Image: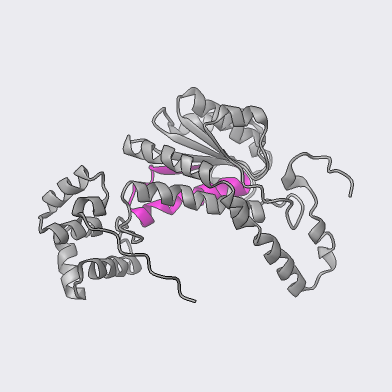
Amino acid sequence: MPPALDPRITEHRNPRTAGIDLASPLEIVDLMNAEDARVAAAVATQREPVARVITLVEAAFRAGGRLFYAGAGTSGRLGVLDASECPPTFGVEPTMVQGIIAGGLPALTRSQEGAEDRPEDGAAAIDAAGLNAHDVLVGIAASGTTPFVRGALARARALGARTAILACTPPPADLVAAVDVAIVPVTGPEVVTGSTRLKAGTATKLVLNMITTGAMIRVGKTFGNLMVDLKASNAKLTDRSERIVMEVCALDRDGARALLARAGGLVKRAIVMHALALDAAQADDALARAGGVVRRATGQAPPPVAPERA
């Protein structure tokens, strides 16, 4: 096979799928599943860089800063998706995690061709978002070269923010040297050449999940693996709030509802109130002293790790 003309791995042809145009539906499924199975291993190679970004984001959150994503196309949409899911999951304000996409809101549902090609637009988007030195910007560029993302990162650095690049092919050396952290899960050539909404998109989603979930856990948005800062904005989440309080506090449904009512509907506050026999204001003070972490406020030890079921 002759060498690829483009150095970006995401633009290389995949020899394992070169005959996919004559494959049956089942063969297509098997080929894609086999390629997707490579993604988690690629992400695992980046465990330390991802952990470093979680640390940066936790520090930003504790200092009143925010997390921003900037990307184009699939990368930008994934950033916006991850940001939009943080408020209902962790009870945070929509400004705490924000996604910036080349082409603006219209690009979420319709491709804006050429929007990614202007670095000055990336810089302007950073200014429009009001990013400052207390914030973190993660630039998302599957190919590692998107001009919009590079412009956004350069502007963020100039403003004093901490920065990271998430790419699925090695980015240019000057970009890697300029950011605080480079996360590069190399997922290899795509099933359809250059279609980075496939393996690269999957890897990106996995990493973004880790960054926000990890940072939110670190600032106390969970009790164990329970989402105790959720906003009960619908029937499902109201039910989940009650079930969490029932489980953690060993209460029946009526008892959990009564406790939540005294806690203003806040699960996290309710757990501390019950565990330490405090009123709402005292529970808030205990949480503040514990950095927002319920288990530190209550002094409860984590449960033993349960063995995996066969």
* Residue found farthest to the top: 158
Residue 194 lies within the magenta run: no
The residue depicted at 48 percent of the width and 29 percent of the height is 127
Taking depth in this image into account, of 14 and 110 the one nearest to the observer is 14
Taking depth in this image into account, of 199 and 261 the one nearest to the observer is 199
Residue 92 lies within the magenta run: yes
Q: Where are the magenta residues, as a range?
A: 72-99
The residue depicted at 79 percent of the width and 54 percent of the height is 14
Answer with the quarter of the image where residue 117 lies: top right
Where residue 269 sits in the image (x, y, percent)? 20, 55
Q: Is residue 98 above or below residue 221?
A: above
Where residue 236 sits in the image (x, y, percent)? 35, 69
Quick check: can you spot residue 236? yes
Where residue 210 sits in the image (x, y, percent)? 48, 51
Q: Is residue 109 above or below residue 67?
A: below
Q: Is residue 57 above or below residue 271?
A: above
Q: How is the image coloured?
A: one colour
Q: Is residue 50 left or right of residue 297?
A: right
* Residue found farthest to the right: 2
Quick check: can you spot residue 109? no
Where residue 255 sits in the image (x, y, percent)? 16, 71
The residue depicted at 15 percent of the width and 52 percent of the height is 283
Q: Is residue 228 left or right of residue 167?
A: left
The residue depicted at 79 percent of the width and 40 percent of the height is 6
- Secondary structure mostly seen in magenta is helix
Answer with the quarter of the image where residue 16 lies: bottom right
Q: Is residue 105 left or right of residue 62?
A: right
Q: Is residue 179 above or below residue 189?
A: above
Q: How many marks?
A: 0
